[in-house]
């Protein structure tokens, strides 16, 4: 159990680093954080609070999807919301020390690092089967009900988050690209793809495939 908790915490922190790199890149935050960031921009409320509100709503959506298959353990995701918010603040502080000159090349490098870290974080913390972040929990819920691949659903889910964020900022913020930009769109498609490649590489090296979906 202790080993699983360690993997969970490490994976969550790595994912928060991915979010931090995406924000610093100035190319748009990660899709899963885009709605929370949009809410923060629109309402001037701390992003930690908007993250909690948004993720709590995602837990409700999971309940509506799974119904009788919704296990009480999924309520632990509320703790994840608080922990992930703290890790994101910490990651932003740490990444601020990484040299960044604002050039196109550095923006692209930071975006690539963000995508890899986000996918790697998911790959590490989801199989620990403690409790997913609500975003991945929603993806997992759809995978359980439909039997589709997690990585495929992840791409569709992230793309949906991007569209919603654009609509929110277009309607209620001064800049439609306030929370999302080209990097967000790229991440929406590439995180799921990268997650699949990491899983395939792990399976090739070890001979064992990691299942990120927990029934």
Image: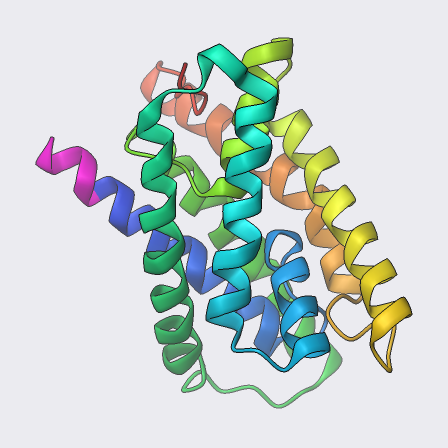
The vertical placement of 94 against 99, above or below, is above
User: Within the magenta stretch, is there residue 2?
Assistant: yes
User: Within the magenta stretch, is there residue 194?
Assistant: no
Colour scheme shown: rainbow
> For this rendering, which residue is in front, 161 or 171?
171
In screen coordinates, is 7 left or right of 211? left
Residue appearing at x 37%, y 24% in the figure: 205
Count up the numbered dots. 0
The vertical placement of 121 against 208, above or below, is below
**Image location (x, y in percent) of residue 141:** 54, 23
Residue 22 is drawn in which quadrant? bottom right
Task: Locate the C terminus and report the quarter of the image it occupies.
Answer: top left
**Image location (x, y in percent) of residue 129:** 31, 28
Residue 154 is drawn in which quadrant? top right
Residue appearing at x 36%, y 36% in the figure: 75
Residue 26 visible, this angle: no
In screen coordinates, is 148 left or right of 10? right
Q: Which residues are magenta?
A: 1-6
- Secondary structure mostly seen in magenta is helix
Residue 156 visible, this angle: yes
> For this rendering, which residue is in front, 83 or 60?
60
Residue appearing at x 57%, y 45% in the figure: 57
Residue appearing at x 53%, y 72% in the figure: 47
The vertical placement of 69 against 41, above or below, is above
**Image location (x, y in percent) of residue 48:** 46, 69
């Amino acid at each position: 159990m202790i080993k699983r908790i360690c993997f969970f915490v490490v994976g969550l922190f790595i994912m928060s680093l991915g979010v931090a790199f995406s924000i610093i890149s100035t190319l748009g935050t990660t899709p899963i954080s885009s709605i929370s960031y949009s809410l923060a921009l629109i309402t001037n409320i701390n992003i930690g609070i908007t993250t909690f509100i948004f993720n709590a709503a995602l837990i409700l959506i999971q309940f509506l999807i799974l119904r009788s298959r919704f296990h009480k353990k999924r309520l632990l995701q509320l703790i994840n919301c608080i922990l992930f918010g703290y890790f994101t603040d910490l990651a932003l502080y740490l990444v601020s020390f990484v040299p960044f000159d604002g050039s196109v090349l550095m923006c692209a490098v930071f975006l690539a690092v963000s995508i890899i870290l986000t996918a790697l974080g998911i790959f590490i913390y989801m199989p620990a089967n403690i409790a997913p972040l609500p975003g991945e929990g929603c993806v997992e819920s759809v995978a359980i009900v439909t039997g589709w691949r997690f990585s495929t659903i992840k791409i569709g889910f992230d793309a949906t988050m991007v569209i919603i964020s654009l609509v929110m900022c277009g309607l209620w913020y001064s800049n439609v690209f306030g929370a999302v930009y080209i990097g967000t769109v790229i991440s929406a498609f590439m995180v799921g793809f990268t997650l699949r490649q990491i899983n395939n590489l792990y399976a090739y090296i070890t001979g064992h495939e990691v299942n990120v979906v927990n029934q």
